Amino acid sequence: MKKKDFTRRDFIKTTSAATAGAILVPTTGSYSASPYDAKGLPTTMLGKTGVRIPRLILGLGSRFMAVEEEKGLEILETGLNKGLYYWDTAALYKNDHEFSEERIGKILKSVRQKVFLATKVGERKADDAKRTIETSLKRLQTDYIDLFQVHSVTTEEEVKQFGAADGVLPVLKKYQEEGVIRHIGFTGHTSASAMKLAAEMYDFDTMLIALNHQKEGQSFEEQPVPVAAKKGMGVLAMKVIRPRETVNGLEPRDLVKYALTLKDITAAVIGTDSLDVMNENIAILKSFKPLSNERMKELRASLDPFYRSKDLPWMQPGYHDGMHWA
């Protein structure tokens, strides 16, 4: 209990410092509140959390887990040294040998206060969710998580059960009261209407959502995103560069800029499998300027075939992020 009490006091001190810093700085810029150091990278506020984050986030899913462990740890160390201190993983992310959380845990314990750590729980029932949360803490070798997210929202029916007595949200809230979890969010890439409903029904801190596609007339950019932003959530984009796999001529850097130019997008999660990819993304961020309205229209036109695709793997029943490139 002493260890948990210390974590709770440390949480209160850190959050207060971050909030105080936010009063003195603009919404965007290169300032980063203690204990995080963006190394001069542009940062922004993560919704109402009082935490400043880089506008690019290290995605540590299947791309990250496709490289050998030594290279993976090098990505983490180098990324942190260059200002990418927001790390995004999930309990489900793994390869044939280890979980992403286990790999991260091997370095996290030595730099814990310098990293904003986000992970995810896929279970919807209280007891199952609790077991996953406890397992994540052990794998990551930490006693607190900065952002725990309900993983992969798929239907409106499941959203309505999040807050039930035996649902996932009461469990997350309990851990939050104990200081084990700082902030709570949700993720999804299947149903725009379900994501919109989750944003409307609950007081989440963040929403992580796939961009650049539609399903049965549901626009992810136009429906859930504005609702979440209006409620003060940090809105994070994923699947940002995936259109280049199905649409010829699209450049990854243009897709990153497209996501960061969208009005309500806080930051983009980019799957990272090499130092070259990471360094290129850092260069894009350092020189980033919002695209013109004309250029955004051009990119939207180019993306239209992708918008309409019915073959996207993450739009298929039963998909989860650990199954394909994330």
Image (spheres, grey):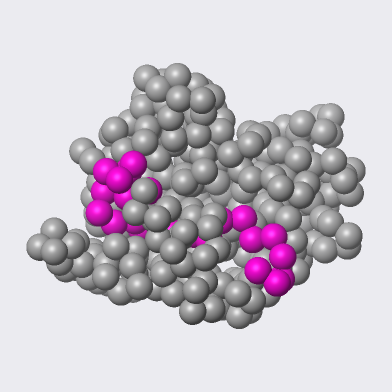
Q: Nearer the viewer, residue 275 or 168?
A: 168
> At which x and y percent is residue 203?
51, 78
- Dividing the image into 4 quarters, which one contains the C terminus? top right
Which residue lies at the image location 32% right of the left edge and 50% below the top edge?
A: 137
Segment colored magenta: 136-158
Which residue lies at the image location 56% right of the left edge and 72% below the top edge?
A: 162
Left or right relative to 312: residue 179: left
For the question of whether residue 217 can be seen, the reply is yes
> At which x and y percent is residue 51?
37, 63
Which residue lies at the image location 49% right of the left edge and 21% below the top edge?
A: 67
Q: Quadrant of residue 227?
A: bottom right
Which residue lies at the image location 20% right of the left edge and 67% below the top edge?
A: 8
> At which x and y percent is residue 124?
55, 63
- Dividing the image into 4 quarters, which one contains the N terminus? bottom left
Check the image and report above or below for 230 versus 237: below
Residue 147 is inside the magenta segment: yes
